[in-house]
Amino acid sequence: MTVQSAVRRGEVTVRDLSKSFTLNGRRLDVLRGIQLDVDGGEALAIVGPSGCGKTTLLRVLAGIEPPDDGSVLIDGRPVQGIGTERAIIFQEPRLLPWLTVLGNVSFGLQVRGTPKAEAESRARHYIRLVGLGDFESAYPRQLSGGMAQRVGIARALTVQPEILLLDEPLGALDAMTKLTMQEELARIWREENVTLILVTHDLEEAIVLADRVLVLPKEKGAASRVIDIDLPRPRDRSEARFVAMRRRLMAEFGLH
Ligand SMILES: Nc1ncnc2c1ncn2[C@@H]1O[C@H](COP(=O)(O)OP(=O)(O)OP(=O)(O)O)[C@@H](O)[C@H]1O
Ligand SMILES: [Mg+2]
């Protein structure tokens, strides 16, 4: 079966976005004056030191958290809360333990009113895409961490979002599984024509996946920077230009 992708764009525009929290009576400026343009179908990685506001930015893009100031536009329309054109994947897959893989992946469509047979048929396509075709009847407790995370990715893709927001989706995985999953995510992104916005601590992961990397600063006054990853795909980690790019990103963090 082939899943027809509808006409979609998935363009994200962020203008003058600011967000602060009040913590113990003190105001904490987390994001200040963020500007960002992400093309439809582009892959953007967001990196920066712990606590600099990566998750907060992703939550604002997802519509889970309102900005204090500024705006987020999806295909030119202001974001008002969560929307079906965006799907978010967290570090933990958060599967429903009483449903099988197929049940978990088709759940989102079923709650939106898609008939069960159609929802399951579409879910099967994405379960195969993440390499779990033999496990659709398994329950979450029968899966490894990497498999569970792949189910989470299939679940997000099944609702065919224009924009996939990922908050360190591979952070909890062991090194080997992580490498495989990075390659799989790169492949899925190529095949699905979806806008990918990926928060990661892992600079190599950013270079494997992204067209551009947004570097958020720790100091709120400092400007964020965007670095183009103009390397051919699929990307070869051992290639000299890849290694040079990693060095350049490390230098952004004062690491050499
Ligand atoms: N709901 C909240 N209430 C108060 N403060 C918050 C809230 N959410 C986040 N913060 C604060 O905002 C800052 C940024 O948090 P955020 O989770 O966005 O950082 P991060 O860049 O994702 O960090 P990490 O890399 O460790 O995940 C932190 O100082 C955090 O304490
Ligand atoms: Mg975070």
Image (cartoon, rainbow, N blue to C red):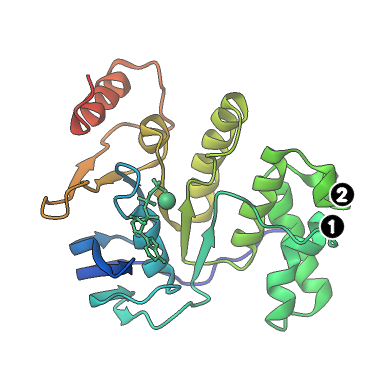
Percent of width and height locating residue 22: 31, 70
Mark 1 touches mark 2? (CB < 8 Å) = yes
Q: Nearer the viewer, residue 224 or 131?
A: 224
- What secondary structure is found at the residue carrying circle 2? loop
Q: Quadrant of the C terminus?
A: top left
Q: Nearer the viewer, residue 183 or 26?
A: 26
The tag earlier along the polypeptide, 1 or 2, is 1
* Residue 18 seen from this side: yes
Q: Quadrant of the N terminus?
A: bottom right
Amino acid type shown at disc 1: Thr
Q: Residues within 10 Å of mark 2 (few under 14, many from 20)?
A: some
Q: Nearer the viewer, residue 248 or 217?
A: 217
Amino acid type shown at disc 2: Ala
Mark count: 2
Residue 112 position (above or below residue 157): below
Query: Residue 25, located in which quarter of the rendered image?
Result: bottom left
Using residue 45 as the reference point, say whether residue 112 is left or right of it.
right
- What secondary structure is found at the residue carrying circle 1? loop
> In the displayed image of the protein, which residue is found farthest to the right?
137
Percent of width and height locating residue 118: 78, 72
Percent of width and height locating residue 63: 42, 74
Q: Going 82% across and 75% down the picture, which residue do you hit? A: 116
Q: Which residue is mark 1?
A: 100
Q: Going 29% across and 78% down the picture, which residue do you hit? A: 76
Residue 113 position (above or below residue 107): below
Percent of width and height locating residue 43: 38, 50
Q: Which residue is mark 2?
A: 138
Query: Residue 108, located in which quarter of the rendered image?
Result: bottom right
Q: Going 41% across and 23% down the picture, which residue do you hit? A: 236
Residue 209 position (above or below residue 66): above
